[in-house]
Image (cartoon, grey):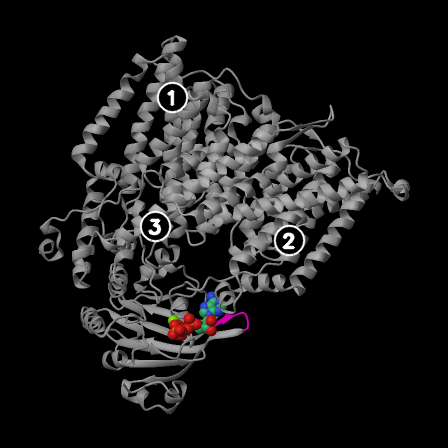
C-alpha cells in the first residue's frame, strides 16, 4: 500500500475541563474514501477543526503528505489558509457560504489561494492578470458544472436550496485544488434523491484523484461509499476497519445503542 | 508621602466613578454582545438631569438633603428611561442584523444624544452645585482626602453591594445571568429575554446616572461632551477587567483610575487622555480577554 | 384604514416621549442668575412630533411587510430603478459623461464661493470612497479614519514648513505616510474582533489628535500651522480665484481616479476576497485566504486615500490645526458611507453630496447637522441598512471557449 497522505497521531483537544478529542490516531491513503462516524457530540467536527487549523490541537501530530511531490508538512499550529494551500480543503456542517455573493463568486473565492493578482493587477489589469481572471472564471464554471449548479451561476448563494448549498460548498472546496477533501455531514438535510446525486458526485470526485474523509450520520451512505470507517465516541476512537468489520463491532453497536447501525 | 496618598485617593475616586459607568457596558455586553456606544451619553444625561433638578430645587429653596435625594432619583429615573428607549428604538430591531449594524446604530445614537442636549440646553460649561457638604470630622485630613472623595467612595461601595445582591439573589438577577450564559437555553426555560435585556439597560443606566451626578458634583461643572471621554474611559476599564465580567469592571476601573491619577500626578497632565487611550489600545492588542475575562474559542 | 389600536399606541408613545424629554427639553435653568425658564411649547412639539413619526414608521413597516410577502410570492419582480440604470452600460455611460461635463464646467457658471464648497464636497466624496473600501467592502469598522487624514494634512504642513517641499512632491508622500501608519496600526489590531477593532481605531484617532494638540515643538499645538502654500502650476502666480478653481480641478481629477481605482479593485480577486471576508471570516480562511494580509491591504489602502485628501485639505485651507480632526469628522465620513450604501460607489457619491452640500445651502439646518448625522446612522441601520443605493452585484459573462476542455490542448 502506498504511503498515507494524512497521518494523525495522538490528537487531543481540551475545552477547559472536557476532552473533546482524546488521543485519536487516523490515517488516509491516496484514493481512499474514509468515513468518520460517531454519535452526536463525539468530537467529529472538532476533529475536522483541529485538522484544518481552526482550533489549535492540545496535543498530537498531524502530518500531511502531498502524493505528487511527496512533500511532508506538519500542520500543527499552521494557519487555516496555509493548510488549505497545502492541499486539504473542507466543507462545514452548518453551511458557511458567502450568502450574498453569487454562486459563481463563491467558487471563485476558492481559486484565491491558487492565484496571485494584488493591487497592481487589479488596477492596471495587465495581460497576466486578465488571463488569470479568465482562468478563475473558466475553472469555477467547470466546477459548477460538475456539482450541477452551472444553471444558477448568478443566483445569490442564500437563495439556493439546502441540498444545492451543500453541493456549492463542495464545489468551493474543490476550487482550492485539494488532494484531500474533508466533508462534514454533506448529506444532512437532503432528501433521498438529493442524497443519491451526492453519492454519485462523491464517487466521481474520488475517481478524479481526490481522497475523501467524510463525517456522516446516514449509515446507508457511509456503508456504501467508504473504503474504511473510523468510529468515535466521547472523544475517543473506539473502532476502525472496513464497513463489514465496523458493522459487527460490539463496541460500535453499544455506542449507537438503539440506533440503526446496519441499515 | 501626602502627595502619594492624595493621588491614591484621587485615583480611587476616579476609579469608582468609572466603575459605575463601566458596569453598564459590561452588563449589556455580557447579555447581547453589543458595545453600547451611547452609554457615555446616558451618563451625561444623568449629570444634566441632576443638574437641572438640583438647580431648580435650590432656587425654590429646598434643603440640601432633599435636593440630593430628589436630584439623584430624578437622574436615575430619567437615565433609565433613556436607556430603555434607546434599546427599544435603536438596538432591538437589529438583534438579528450583522454585528456591525447595531454598533453603527449605537454610534449614531451617541452623536444624536450629544447634539440633542447641546441644542436643547447649551454648549457652555455649566457650574454644578456642590451637593456634598464638607464634613467636620474630615477636617484634619481635608488637604489630602476631600469630603466628596469619601462620599463617592462610600456611595459607590454601597451601590456595588446592592448590585451584587440584585444579581446574585433576585429573580431578575438570576434571569440575567442565565441569559448571559445561553440565550437560547434561557428562552427554553421560560425566561422573557426581551424583558431581561430591558432590565439590564435600565439598571446599567441608573448606575451611570448616579456616577454622573457624583462626578459632576465632585468636579463642579458639566457640559454636553463629558459623556464621550468618560464613556471611552469606562469602556477601557471594562475591557481591562474583562468585558462581560462584573467584578472585572470594578477591578479594571480601579486600576485605570489609579494609573491615570499617578501618571498625571508624576509625569504630565497634558497627556492624561493619551494614557487612557494607549492603555486601551495595548490591552486590546495584547490581552483582549482582560484581567478577569475568559478567552473564548468560537464554536464552528 | 389606520386601526384605532395603532392610534392608541402612537398616543402612548407621544406621552412617553413628552415625559422622557421633559427635564432636558422643557426646563432651562440659569445657575448664575438663578432663574428657571419653562419651555412648555417644546413639550407640545415633542409630543406631536413623536405621534406623527410613530404613525409614519408603523405605516412604513406595514408596507414593507406586505411588500416582502408579495416578493416571496413573485421573486425578483422589480429591480429598483437606479439599480437598473447602473447595471445597463447604455444608460450608465452617457449618464457618467453628462455628470463629468457638468463637473468640468461647474466653476465657469458658479462663483468662487460655490466652487469652494463644491471642492469640499468632492473631497468628502474621495474620503467616503476611501473609507468605503475599508468599511463598506471589507467590513472593517474604522472609527479613526480621520487620523490618516490628519497625517496627510500635517505631512504637507510640516514638510513644507521645515524643508520647503511643494504640494506635488508631498501629495504622494502624504498618502504613503498615512498608508505606512495604517500598516503599523493594522498589523497588531486587525486580528481583533470587529467591534474591538472599531474601538481601537477610535482610540488611535484620538491619540493622534491629542499628540498634535499637546506636542507643541512638533506640531505647534492647538494654534496649528498657517500660511501653507496652495498648489503651484509650473511656478505660475495665480490669483486667489483661479487658485480655488485650480484646486477644484485637482479634486475632480482625484475623484475620477478614485472611482476608477475603487471600481477596478472591487471587481478583482482582491475585491472578492474583501467581500467574502465581510461575510464569513472562518469560511474565508478555510478557503485559503490570508485574513490578516487581505485586511491589511484594505486598511492601508483606505489610509492612503485619506492621506492624499489630507494633503489637498491643507493646501486648500492653507491652515491646519488639530480641531479639524476630531472624532466627529470620522463620524461624518462614516455617515456618508452608511447613508450612501455600504460598498456602493454611486451611493457614496450621493451620500457625500447630500450630507456635505445640504447643510451648506440650508444654513438654518447647519445647526442641526450633527444631530441629523447621528439620526441618519440610527434610522438607516434600522430601516434601510443597505443605504440609499445598494451595491450592484456584478454578473460574469462566459465565452464558450472558456471551458477547460477547449483551452487545454
Ligand atoms: N469551541 C468549543 N468550546 C467548548 N466546547 C466545544 C467547542 N467546540 C466543541 N465543543 C464540545 O466538544 C464536543 C464535541 O463536539 P463536536 O461538534 O465535535 O461533535 P460532533 O461529533 O461533530 O457532533 P455532531 O454529530 O452533533 O455534529 C461537544 O461536547 C461540544 O460541546
Ligand atoms: Mg459535527
Q: Are marks 3 and 2 on the same chain?
A: no
Toward which corner of the image does residue C230 lie, by quadrant? top left
In contact (CB < 8 Å): disc 2 and disc 1: no
The residue wearing badge 3 is C65
Q: In this view, does C270 lie above or below C403?
A: above
The residue wearing badge 1 is C119
In the image: residue B72, left or right of residue B45? right
Q: How far apart are marks 3 and 1 (CA)?
A: 41 Å
* Element class at badge 3: helix
Residue C82, position as x, y percentages in the image = 25, 36
Residue B148, position as x, y percentages in the image = 79, 41
Q: Is the magenta stretch mostly helix, strand or loop?
A: strand
* Element class at badge 2: helix
Q: Mark 3 lies on which chain?
A: C
Q: How far apart are marks 2 and 1 (CA)?
A: 47 Å
Callout in the foreground (3, 1): 3
Q: In this view, does C169 lie above or below A257?
A: above
The residue wearing badge 2 is B249
Q: Residue at x 88, y 43 (%)?
A: B138
Quadrant for ligand 2? bottom left
In contact (CB < 8 Å): disc 3 and disc 2: no
Q: Distance between the residues labelled 3 and 2?
A: 42 Å
Q: Quadrant of the N terminus of chain C?
A: top left
Q: Would residue C270 be seen by someone viewing this image from the given angle? A: yes
Q: Nearer the viewer, residue A236 or B100?
A: B100
Residue B84, position as x, y percentages in the image = 56, 48
Q: Give the range drawn in magenta.
A: A13-17
**Disc 2: residue Cβ within 8 A of ligand 1's nearest atom:** no
Confirm whether the magenta stretch covers residue A76.
Answer: no
Q: Residue at x 34, y 46 (%)?
A: C63
Residue C16, position as x, y percentages in the image = 56, 43
Amino acid at each position: 500500500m502506498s504511503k498515507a497522505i494524512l497521518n494523525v497521531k495522538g490528537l487531543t483537544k481540551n475545552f477547559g475541563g472536557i476532552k473533546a478529542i482524546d488521543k485519536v490516531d487516523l490515517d488516509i491513503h491516496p484514493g481512499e474514501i474514509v468515513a468518520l462516524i460517531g454519535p452526536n457530540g463525539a468530537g467529529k467536527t472538532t476533529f475536522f477543526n483541529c485538522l484544518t487549523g481552526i482550533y489549535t490541537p492540545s496535543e498530537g501530530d498531524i502530518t500531511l503528505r502531498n502524493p505528487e511531490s511527496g512533500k511532508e508538512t506538519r500542520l500543527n499550529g499552521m494557519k487555516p489558509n496555509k493548510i488549505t494551500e497545502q492541499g486539504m480543503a473542507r466543507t462545514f456542517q452548518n453551511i458557511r457560504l458567502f450568502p450574498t455573493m453569487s454562486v459563481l463568486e463563491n467558487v471563485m473565492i476558492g481559486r484565491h489561494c491558487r492565484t496571485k493578482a494584488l493591487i497592481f493587477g487589479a488596477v492596471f489589469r495587465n495581460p497576466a492578470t486578465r488571463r488569470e481572471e479568465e482562468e478563475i472564471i473558466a475553472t469555477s464554471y467547470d466546477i459548477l458544472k460538475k456539482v450541477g449548479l452551472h444553471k444558477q451561476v448568478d443566483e445569490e448563494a442564500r437563495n439556493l436550496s439546502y441540498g444545492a448549498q451543500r453541493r456549492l460548498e463542495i464545489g468551493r472546496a474543490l476550487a482550492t485544488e485539494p488532494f484531500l477533501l474533508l466533508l462534514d455531514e454533506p448529506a444532512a438535510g437532503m432528501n433521498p434523491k438529493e442524497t443519491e446525486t451526492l453519492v454519485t458526485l462523491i464517487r466521481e470526485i474520488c475517481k478524479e484523484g481526490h481522497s475523501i474523509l467524510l463525517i456522516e450520520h446516514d449509515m446507508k451512505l457511509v456503508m456504501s461509499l467508504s473504503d474504511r470507517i473510523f468510529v468515535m465516541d466521547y472523544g475517543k476512537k473506539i473502532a476502525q476497519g472496513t464497513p463489514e468489520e465496523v458493522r459487527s463491532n460490539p463496541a460500535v453497536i453499544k455506542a449507537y445503542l438503539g440506533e440503526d447501525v446496519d441499515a | 508621602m501626602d502627595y502619594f496618598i492624595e493621588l491614591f485617593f484621587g485615583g480611587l475616586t476616579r476609579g469608582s466613578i468609572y466603575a459605575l459607568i463601566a458596569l453598564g457596558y459590561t452588563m449589556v455586553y455580557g447579555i447581547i454582545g453589543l458595545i453600547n456606544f451611547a452609554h457615555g451619553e446616558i451618563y451625561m444625561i444623568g449629570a444634566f438631569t441632576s443638574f437641572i433638578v438640583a438647580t431648580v430645587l435650590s432656587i425654590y429653596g429646598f434643603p440640601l438633603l432633599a435636593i440630593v435625594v430628589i436630584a439623584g432619583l430624578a437622574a436615575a429615573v430619567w437615565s433609565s428611561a433613556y436607556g430603555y428607549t434607546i434599546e427599544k428604538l435603536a438596538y432591538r430591531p437589529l438583534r438579528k442584523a450583522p454585528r456591525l449594524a447595531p454598533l453603527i446604530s449605537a454610534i449614531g445614537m451617541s452623536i444624536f444624544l450629544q447634539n440633542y442636549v447641546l441644542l436643547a440646553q447649551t454648549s457652555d460649561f455649566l457650574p454644578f452645585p456642590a451637593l456634598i457638604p464638607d464634613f467636620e470630622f474630615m477636617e484634619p485630613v481635608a488637604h489630602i482626602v476631600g469630603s466628596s472623595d469619601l462620599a463617592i467612595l462610600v456611595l459607590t461601595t454601597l451601590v456595588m453591594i446592592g448590585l451584587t445582591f440584585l444579581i446574585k439573589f433576585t429573580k431578575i438577577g438570576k434571569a440575567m445571568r442565565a441569559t448571559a450564559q445561553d440565550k437560547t437555553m434561557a428562552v427554553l426555560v421560560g425566561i422573557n429575554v426581551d424583558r431581561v435585556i430591558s432590565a439590564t439597560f435600565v439598571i446599567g443606566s441608573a448606575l451611570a446616572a448616579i456616577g454622573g451626578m457624583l462626578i459632576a458634583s465632585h468636579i463642579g461643572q458639566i457640559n454636553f461632551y463629558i459623556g464621550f471621554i468618560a464613556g471611552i474611559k469606562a469602556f477601557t476599564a471594562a475591557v481591562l477587567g474583562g468585558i462581560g465580567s462584573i467584578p472585572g469592571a470594578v477591578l479594571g476601573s480601579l486600576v485605570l483610575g489609579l494609573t491615570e491619577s499617578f501618571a498625571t500626578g508624576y509625569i504630565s497632565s497634558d497627556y492624561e487622555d493619551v494614557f487612557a487611550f494607549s492603555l486601551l489600545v495595548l490591552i486590546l492588542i495584547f490581552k483582549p480577554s482582560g484581567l478577569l475575562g475568559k478567552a473564548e474559542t468560537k464554536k464552528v | 384604514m389606520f386601526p384605532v389600536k395603532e392610534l392608541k399606541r402612537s398616543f402612548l408613545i407621544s406621552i412617553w416621549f413628552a415625559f422622557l424629554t421633559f427635564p432636558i427639553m422643557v426646563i432651562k435653568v440659569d445657575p448664575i442668575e438663578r432663574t428657571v425658564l419653562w419651555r412648555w411649547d417644546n413639550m407640545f412639539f415633542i409630543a406631536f412630533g413623536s405621534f406623527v413619526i410613530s404613525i409614519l414608521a408603523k405605516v412604513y413597516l406595514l408596507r414593507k411587510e406586505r411588500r416582502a410577502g408579495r416578493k416571496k410570492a413573485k421573486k425578483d419582480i422589480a429591480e429598483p430603478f437606479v439599480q437598473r440604470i447602473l447595471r445597463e452600460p447604455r444608460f450608465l455611460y452617457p449618464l457618467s459623461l453628462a455628470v463629468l461635463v457638468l463637473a468640468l464646467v461647474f466653476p465657469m457658471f458658479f462663483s468662487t464661493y460655490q466652487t469652494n464648497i463644491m471642492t469640499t464636497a468632492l473631497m468628502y466624496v474621495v474620503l467616503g470612497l476611501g473609507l468605503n473600501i475599508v468599511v463598506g467592502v471589507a467590513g472593517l469598522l474604522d472609527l479613526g479614519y480621520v487620523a490618516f487624514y490628519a497625517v496627510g494634512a500635517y505631512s504637507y504642513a510640516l514638510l513644507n514648513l521645515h524643508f520647503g517641499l511643494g504640494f506635488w512632491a508631498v501629495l504622494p508622500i502624504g498618502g504613503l505616510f498615512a498608508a505606512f501608519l495604517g500598516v503599523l496600526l493594522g498589523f497588531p489590531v486587525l486580528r481583533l474582533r470587529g467591534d474591538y477593532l472599531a474601538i481601537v481605531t477610535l482610540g488611535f484617532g484620538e491619540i493622534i489628535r491629542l499628540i498634535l494638540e499637546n506636542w507643541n515643538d512638533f506640531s505647534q499645538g492647538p494654534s496649528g500651522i498657517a500660511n501653507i502654500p496652495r498648489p503651484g502650476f509650473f511656478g505660475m502666480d495665480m490669483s486667489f480665484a483661479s487658485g480655488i478653481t485650480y484646486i477644484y480641478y485637482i479634486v475632480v481629477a482625484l475623484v475620477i481616479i478614485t472611482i476608477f481605482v475603487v471600481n477596478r479593485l472591487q471587481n478583482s480577486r482582491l475585491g472578492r476576497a474583501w467581500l467574502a471576508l465581510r461575510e464569513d471570516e472562518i469560511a474565508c480562511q478555510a478557503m485559503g485566504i490570508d485574513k490578516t494580509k487581505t485586511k491589511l491591504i484594505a486598511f492601508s489602502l483606505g489610509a492612503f486615500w485619506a492621506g492624499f485628501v489630507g494633503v489637498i485639505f491643507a493646501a486648500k485651507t492653507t491652515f491646519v490645526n488639530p480641531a479639524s480632526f476630531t472624532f466627529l469628522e470620522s463620524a461624518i465620513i462614516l455617515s456618508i458611507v452608511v447613508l450612501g450604501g455600504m460598498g456602493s460607489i454611486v451611493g457614496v457619491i450621493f451620500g457625500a453630496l447630500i450630507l456635505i452640500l445640504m447643510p451648506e445651502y440650508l444654513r438654518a439646518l447647519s445647526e442641526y447637522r450633527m444631530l441629523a448625522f447621528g439620526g441618519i446612522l440610527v434610522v438607516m441601520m434600522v430601516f434601510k441598512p443597505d443605504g440609499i443605493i445598494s451595491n450592484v452585484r456584478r454578473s460574469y459573462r462566459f465565452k464558450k471557449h472558456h471551458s477547460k476542455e477547449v483551452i487545454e490542448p
